[in-house]
Amino acid sequence: MILSKRQMLVGLVFLLLAATVVSLTIGQDLFNNRRPDLLSFGLVNFAGYLFFIILPVELLVPWYLAEGHRALDVVPLAVVTALMAQAVDYGIGRLFSTTLVQALIGERRLRASHDRIERWGGLALFAFNVTPLSSPVLLAAAGVVRYHPVKAFLWSASGLSVKYAFIAWAFG
């Protein structure tokens, strides 16, 4: 697949945005020879769960644990900031009108997508959140098809909790 100039430009802008977030938070701590604080962790983790910024934020957990932060501080902060960003993702998906989505993909495909998400959405949300797959994109899609928000966030919170608890256990 060949990317268009516009797609490459958008990707570059988001990459620069991600690099800016990291350098303004963790980068400042490193340059000033300070232990990275939990505020910088929360900001980078939040940014990493926005569907238009791709950051491997799971890698931060072992690093912050090695820096002396407690797992009981890092894990809940990771889950809460991820859920806050996913709420933004879901909300952006909800902003797309059904009419617009129907015009883009067709009524039949929209109905089929909705049926699949109603049937498998919870398990997919759990699976995408328990692994380093791009769960924010799935939350945006759940918003587009109007998947029940409480179900979406319960499945996401469950997957995120398992993932971050496992990382903390493995590296703590």
Image (cartoon, rainbow, N blue to C red):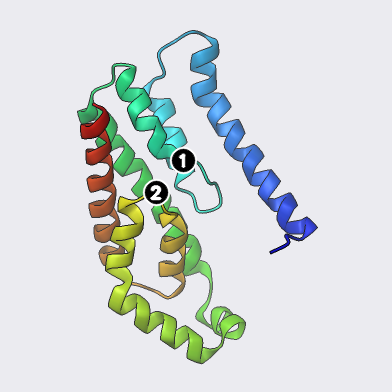
| Separation of marks 2 and 1 at Cα, in angstroms | 8 Å
- Where residue 83 sits: x, y (%)? 34, 49
- Position of 142 compared to 15: left or right? left
- Crowd tier of the residue under label 1, counting other residues whose Cα lies within 10 Å: few below 14, some 14–19, many 20 or above: some
Mark with earlier residue (2, 1) = 1
Closer to us: 153 or 159: 159
- Where residue 67 sits: x, y (%)? 34, 17
**Point 20% across, 30% down: residue:** 72
**Point 27% across, 66% down: residue:** 123
Proximity of marks 2 and 1: CB atoms separated by less than 8 Å: yes
Q: Which mark is residue 56?
A: 1
Closer to us: 102 or 71: 71
**Point 44% across, 47% down: residue:** 49
User: Eyeballing the image, is 120 above or below 110?
Assistant: above
Residue that label 2 marks: 132
Q: Mark 2 is on which residue type?
A: Pro
- Position of 23 compared to 149: left or right? right
Element carrying mark 2 = loop
